[in-house]
């Protein structure tokens, strides 16, 4: 059976008249709705950014004048003497955070890989996920007391190591959950491609899934890092603080948040000024380290990658 | 050189669904074999059983015997070893997005711990030439991501990646269904060239494609292999009424 070819051209729809009242109203309505939604988005952005800018601005206003060379090179002066700096606290914070990252990031990522790649539907995985969520909700002061009981008490002294462990445990749940959810966004087809080449499952998880998800996982690690960098409570009973130079992991060590806490709650104006300066330095150091990691992680990106 | 595959009493399940029922077939070496049939009839499950990809799904199960040459792949070999000897190309191009074109092709060797630079260079060039992609990408090998290529180029990249580990069999699960006609014909030309060196099994929804590239064709319906014969026979004088109904477009 064959159909005859059409000889008359198909009837075209009449061009729409955009100048009716109804059309004009519709047009106006769409424009207004579009503007309102766009405006709300901009407004929300401003609301989110404002506090950050205010805090930073206020810190610069209060703290920048007390920043000088001595602040970064000297240790605190005895009570009553002016001057001195937080050099030992800056280095101390660096030591504690390095320790915490060295312990917390690998454990956090490993747990996340287990949850996303190997543990699907297993009882252990449910337990691990639940533990991570509970751990995330533990108040930081409780974490301090727990580490005090577990490490400081048996060792009979405060230590940088105990501080690092406390912060590491606080980092783990954030990193684990981000790693898990970032791995969940890696398309299954990518894993199949690797398995289909005869790559073992563990190797696929590390070299393919983890690598594909790495930008998001790095963000998660940075969030966890930035969060614990300013923690004071867990360090009170663990790193304890130190008015003198120390980089010994088994001795009490100074830390920026602790020193800020001591200065801010002290009775002297000079101390208050130093506390402001310390806060400014803490925030700037966190921002610089997060930015550095990002720049480093973005290097070697390929053209046209996803 | 390609090796043939012999399948005896192959059954496969997803959960409680009996996806493949008692398949017996011999796929000859160094020929292209097409598998046709309506969606959900078990073609994909069948090819996934041939290189033990089926079992990567936690609810999947398979029984029966699959032999690569004389080797019983379920009894006497590891899944990893079998997948190196039986390569696979998937329906949607799936290059590794974080890897360069070069690393994509070299991935099968690199991820298995092979590091020798000069050999890798040779393998990458040879594989990309076999998959007819070399001329298009040779200047951006290490600069561009595999994901930056067009769909058709990505699929040829995936073929190069599969060839780089030097398999004996190449399984292709609807390799051209996501591609435009020009890319499709390139893939078909490729299959035509590759079958002198590899045993090729291609799943396709496109019956002209089966007729163009394959010497033998199997027709699947509802988890059973209804008919397996030379492509010519299947398309001109099928034994089974259901095969005839399918190829003449009466259902499916």
Image: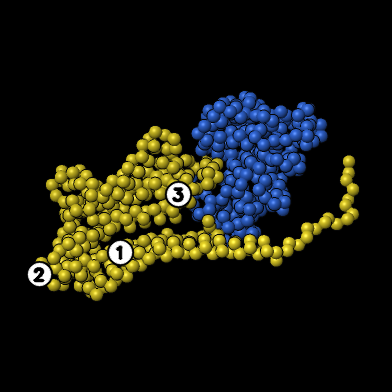
Chain colours: A yellow, B blue
Q: Nearer the viewer, residue A67 or A262?
A: A262
- Quote the CA–CA distance across marks 2 and 1: 27 Å
Is residue A193 visible from the viewing direction of this image?
A: no
Rendering coords of residue A166 (x, y %): 25, 49
Left or right of B78? Residue B189 is right
Badge 1 local density, few (<14 within 10 Å), some, or many (20+)?
A: some
Element assignment for label 3:
helix
Q: Which numbered circle lies on residue A283?
A: 1
Badge 2 marks a residue whose secondary structure is loop
Q: Which secondary structure, mark 1?
A: helix
Which quadrant of the view contains residue A60?
Answer: bottom left
Evaluate if marks 2 and 3 touch, with contact meaning CB atoms under 8 Å apart: no
Where residue A80 is drawn, which disc sits there? 2
Q: Residue at x 53, y 56 (%)?
A: A306
Q: Quarter-wise, where is residue A71 in the image?
A: bottom left
Residue that badge 3 annotates? A182
Q: Quadrant of the N terminus of chain A?
A: top right
In percent of width and height, residue B66 lies at 59, 29
Earlier-in-chain disc, 1 versus 3: 3
Estimate the spatial distance between the alpha carbons at disc 2 and disc 3, rounded to whole Å.
53 Å
Q: Earlier in the sequence, mark 2 or mark 1?
A: 2
A119 left or right, relative to B81: left
Instruction: Using the rendered image, report if marks 2 and 1 lie on a common chain.
Output: yes
Tell me if label 1 and label 3 are in contact, CB under 8 Å.
no
Picture coordinates of residue B27 (x, y %)?
67, 33
């Amino acid at each position: 059976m064959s159909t005859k070819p059409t000889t008359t051209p198909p009837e075209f729809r009449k061009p729409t008249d955009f100048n009716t009242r109804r059309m004009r109203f519709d047009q106006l309505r769409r424009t207004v709705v579009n503007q309102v939604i766009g405006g709300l988005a901009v407004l929300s952005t401003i609301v989110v950014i404002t506090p950050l800018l205010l805090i930073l601005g206020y810190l610069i206003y209060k703290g920048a004048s007390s920043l000088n060379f001595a602040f970064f090179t000297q240790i605190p002066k005895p009570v009553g003497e002016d001057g001195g700096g937080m050099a030992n606290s800056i280095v101390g914070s660096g030591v504690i955070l390095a320790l915490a990252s060295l312990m917390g990031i690998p454990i956090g990522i490993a747990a996340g890989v287990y949850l996303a790649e190997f543990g699907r539907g297993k009882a252990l995985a449910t337990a691990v996920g639940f533990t991570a969520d509970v751990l995330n909700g533990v108040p930081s002061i409780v974490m301090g007391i727990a580490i005090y009981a577990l490490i400081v008490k048996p060792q009979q002294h405060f230590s940088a190591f105990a501080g690092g462990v406390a912060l590491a445990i606080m980092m783990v749940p954030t990193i684990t959950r981000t790693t898990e959810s970032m791995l969940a966004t890696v398309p299954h087809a990518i894993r199949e491609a690797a398995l289909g080449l005869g790559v073992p499952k563990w190797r696929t998880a590390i070299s393919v899934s983890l690598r594909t998800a790495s930008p998001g996982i790095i963000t998660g690690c940075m969030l966890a890092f930035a969060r614990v960098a300013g923690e004071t409570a867990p360090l009170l009973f663990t790193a304890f603080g130190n008015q003198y130079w120390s980089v010994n992991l088994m001795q009490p060590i100074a830390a920026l948040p602790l020193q800020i806490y001591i200065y801010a709650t002290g009775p002297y104006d000079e101390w208050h000024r130093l506390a402001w300066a310390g806060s400014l330095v803490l925030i700037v150091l966190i921002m610089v380290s997060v930015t550095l990691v990002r720049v480093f992680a973005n290097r070697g990106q390929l053209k046209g990658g996803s | 050189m390609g090796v043939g595959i012999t399948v005896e009493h192959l059954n496969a399940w997803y959960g409680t669904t009996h996806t493949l029922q008692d398949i017996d077939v011999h796929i000859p070496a160094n020929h292209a074999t097409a598998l046709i049939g309506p969606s959900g009839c078990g073609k994909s499950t069948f090819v996934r059983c041939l290189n033990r990809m089926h079992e990567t799904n936690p609810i999947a199960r398979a029984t029966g015997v699959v032999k690569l040459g004389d080797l019983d792949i379920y009894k006497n070999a590891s899944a990893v070893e079998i997948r190196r000897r039986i390569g696979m190309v998937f329906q949607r191009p799936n290059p590794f997005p974080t890897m360069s074109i070069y690393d994509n092709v070299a991935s099968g060797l690199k991820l298995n711990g092979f590091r020798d630079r000069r050999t890798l260079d040779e393998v990458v060039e040879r594989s990309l030439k076999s998959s007819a992609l070399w001329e298009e990408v040779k200047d951006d090998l290490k600069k561009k991501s595999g994901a930056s290529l067009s769909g058709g180029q990505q699929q040829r990249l995936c073929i190069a990646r599969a060839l780089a580990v030097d398999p004996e069999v190449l399984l292709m699960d609807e390799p051209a269904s996501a591609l435009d006609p020009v890319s499709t014909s390139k893939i078909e030309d490729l299959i035509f060239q590759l079958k002198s060196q590899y045993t090729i099994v291609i799943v396709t929804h496109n019956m002209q494609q089966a007729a163009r590239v394959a010497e033998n064709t199997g027709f699947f319906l509802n988890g059973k292999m209804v008919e397996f014969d030379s492509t010519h026979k299947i398309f001109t004088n099928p034994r089974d009424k259901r095969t005839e109904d399918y190829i003449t477009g009466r259902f499916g």
